[in-house]
Structure formats: C-alpha cells, structure tokens
Amino acid sequence: MPPYPTGSWMPVALSADLPAGTVMPAQSPAGPIALWRSRSGRVAAFADRCPHRGMRLSHGFVRGETLSCIYHGWSYAQAGNCLRIPAHPALTPPDTIRVATQPVEDGGGIIWIPVGEPAAVPPRFDGVTPLRSMVVEADVAALESAAGTKAGEGLLDCTHDGRTVRLLLAPEGKARTLMHVLVDEDSNPSERIAASRAAEGLRRAAEHVAASGTAR
C-alpha cells in the first residue's frame, strides 16, 4: 500500500492513549510531532522540537491549556505561540517565537493528522471501536503478506489464528507500521482479548516476513 495520499487523513494515535493533561510522541507525514491534550480536553499537534534549544516537546508537560518544554520551561499555547519564558518572567514573548502546528481531529476514538490539505473530514467506522495500538517492525507489504490479503484505504481485514480482526494501518517510515486494532462495539471482554492476541500473532508473522525478505 502506498503512503496515505494527499488530501487524506492519517490515524496517528488512539484518543484513549492521550488523557487530558498529557503529551505523547507520534509520527505524521511531515515528521515527528508532539500530540498533547489540555486539561480542558482539547488536542493539539506540534512539531516535536522546541524553538529554543531543539528539545523534544513530547518530553514536556501540560499545565492547564499550555505545553511546557522540559528543558527551560518555555510554555506554548495551542496555537503554537510562546506565552512564557521562565528566565524572563516580565517579558511578553514576541509572536515570532512559536512552534509549528498541524491540524488535528479527534473523533471516533482516533486522533487524525491530515496529509497536505484535507479534502474532507476524517473517516468514521460505524459499529466498531478502537481497542489498542501496536508498533510493527515491518512495512505494510509484510503485513499484507502475513495476512494473505491486501489493505484498502488503510484498512486491513484478515483472519489470523481463526479470529477475524480489522486493522487500521499508518506507515511510520520504510520498515515500521503503526497498527490500530478495531473491534465490534458490542464485543465482550473475551472477544476483545482474542482480537488483541490475533493482532499480536499477525505482528509477529509480519516481522518474520520482513526479516526473511519474503513479502510479496
């Protein structure tokens, strides 16, 4: 499967993995980003680099409606502008000090980043809910080979170890894929455990395919 085309949306994280008041690293088509959720629940996506010394903002911390760099404490609003420099508390930071931001949408339990200018809203998947995410050290072609079927528009439906699972894929470079496991909304705990184990089995199979170079 080729990378997500321009105008589409890429699923970079699950909403449940980003509680209010937290920040996490993620990969977007433009490179590494810091995803963070303010105390009020709003999600923002920053380039994962503080303009001051280049520290990763995903190592920082959320205070109220701002994200602060862990290095020198520079604080940024969700629009990316710097609000506070602790070493100069009386200074109002100029508007030129800001972090590059990306559009982000949080819906249906999935956090999406657009590829270029989005042509529409992110897709919704009726009747299913996200269960978990896992990183696969293999590309999408290896996953397709292990599953015995092709992905369509980022979705891979397959049967592994006797269990049918639906996977939402997001390539993270040439040899890594972020895989989100989706299950039926009305699935019971045992069915969810089985789906999770099936996805783990597929991950191992795909990584074996990638290591052996047998992807088709």
Image (cartoon, helix red, strand yellow):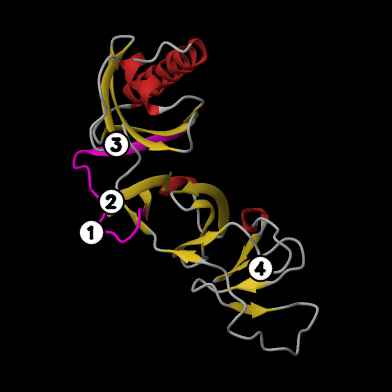
Q: Secondary structure at mark 4?
A: loop
Magenta-drawn stretch, dominant element (helix, strand or loop): loop
Which disc number belongs to residue 8? 2
Q: Residue 93 in the image: x percent, y percent? A: 66, 84
Asked if labels 1 and 3 touch by Cβ distance under 8 angstroms, the answer is: no
Q: Earlier in the sequence, mark 1 or mark 2?
A: 2
Q: Earlier in the sequence, mark 3 or mark 1?
A: 1
Estimate the spatial distance between the alpha carbons at disc 4 and disc 1, rounded to whole Å: 30 Å
Residue with the mark numbered 1: 119
**Depth check: 163 or 5 in front?**
5
Q: Is residue 85 left or right of residue 172?
A: right
Asked if labels 1 and 4 touch by Cβ distance under 8 angstroms, the answer is: no
Residue bounds of the magenta highlight = 114-133
**Depth check: 189 or 124 in front?**
124
Which disc number belongs to residue 51? 4
Estimate the spatial distance between the alpha carbons at disc 2 and disc 4, rounded to whole Å: 29 Å
Which disc number belongs to residue 154? 3
Residue at the image position 53 percent from the left and 67 percent from the top: 100
Inspect the magenta stretch and tell me whether residue 128 lies in it: yes
How busy is the neighbourhood of tag 4: few (under 14 within 10 Å), some, or many (20 plus)? some
